[in-house]
Every structure is written in C-alpha cells, then in structure tokens.
Amino acid sequence: MLNGLPSGYSLGRVGRSGSLNWPGSRRDIEQIWKEHGALEYRECVGDDLEVKFGIGFPKTTKLKPGETVVFAWIVYKSRAHRDRVNAKVMKDPRLTEMCMKDAEMPFDVKRMNYGGFKVLVDA
C-alpha cells in the first residue's frame, strides 16, 4: 500500500490490428519486457465488442473491416520502474529486429489509446 492505495503501476494501450501475426511471436515480446523487469505482460484480443451502452472500442479505434481490437497492459512496481524498464526494452535489439522484419507494423499508432495508470483497487 502506498498512501492508502495498492502499490503498482500499469501501462495500458488499446489499438487495432489488421494482423495478429507479429514477425516475432507474442511470447517473444512478453519475454523481452519481463527480462527487463516488467512484472506482468498481457495482450487480449477483442471478443465481445458490440456494447449497448457507452462508446465501444470499435468506435474509439476507428475499426475497419478485417481488423480487431487488441487491449494490452504491462504491470510495473511504479512509474519510475516503468520508465527504466521501457528505456531498456526500446534499446533491445530483438524488438528492433522484430519491427524491422515487416515494413508495416501490425498496428496503427495513430489509432492507439495509451497511458499510464496507478493501481486503485487490487483485489
């Protein structure tokens, strides 16, 4: 607990993907983050996105036919820990190599929602 709140920090992103096939496997990507200190790494693919209330992910990501929504998050000890881990990950040649194998990224960063979150409830 930190200031009455559960400890931890998460980096979340929501994006769309025309292809769920990275040049490297998703396990390879998870491994890179975890080797550099991430506590957890998750990627989830849209399954039930037609909501009857609020604004659904297909609308916020401007989903096109043949695309799907991917929701991902990485858990860290703190925001400072996130910054240290991400700096190492971005310098990791394995990630660079995976991104360079394919001329087009499997997601569109212009339609990606992204942000850091403090843990509010950890049950």
Image: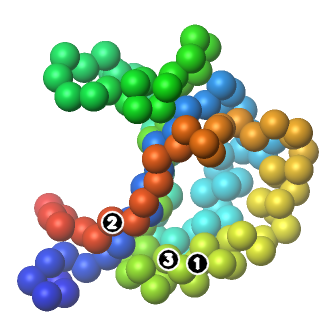
* Nearer the observer, 88 or 25: 88
| Lower position in the chain sequence, tag 3 or tag 2 | 3
Q: Secondary structure at mark 3?
A: helix
Residue 106 at x, y = what percent? 71, 36
Quarter of the N terminus within the rendering: bottom left
Lateral position of residue 116 relative to residue 50, left or right? right
**Residue that numbered label 2 is attached to:** 117
Residue 97 at x, y = what percent? 87, 56
Q: How is the image coloured?
A: rainbow
Residue 108 at x, y = what percent? 65, 38
**Residue that numbered label 1 is attached to:** 85
Does the image show residue 45?
no
Q: Badge 3 local density, few (<14 within 10 Å), some, or many (20+)?
A: many
Q: For residue 34, what is the image quadrant? A: bottom right
Lateral position of residue 17 relative to residue 81, left or right? right
Q: For residue 49, what is the image quadrant? A: top left
Q: Are marks 1 and 3 in contact (CB under 8 Å)?
A: yes
What amino acid type should be assigned to the residue bearing mark 2?
A: Phe
**Residue that numbered label 3 is attached to:** 82
Quarter of the C terminus within the rendering: bottom left
What amino acid type should be assigned to the residue bearing mark 3?
A: Arg
Does the image show residue 107?
yes
Residue for point 65% across, 25% down: 18
Q: Is residue 59 above or below residue 40?
A: above
What amino acid type should be assigned to the residue bearing mark 1?
A: Val
Residue for point 72% across, 70% down: 90
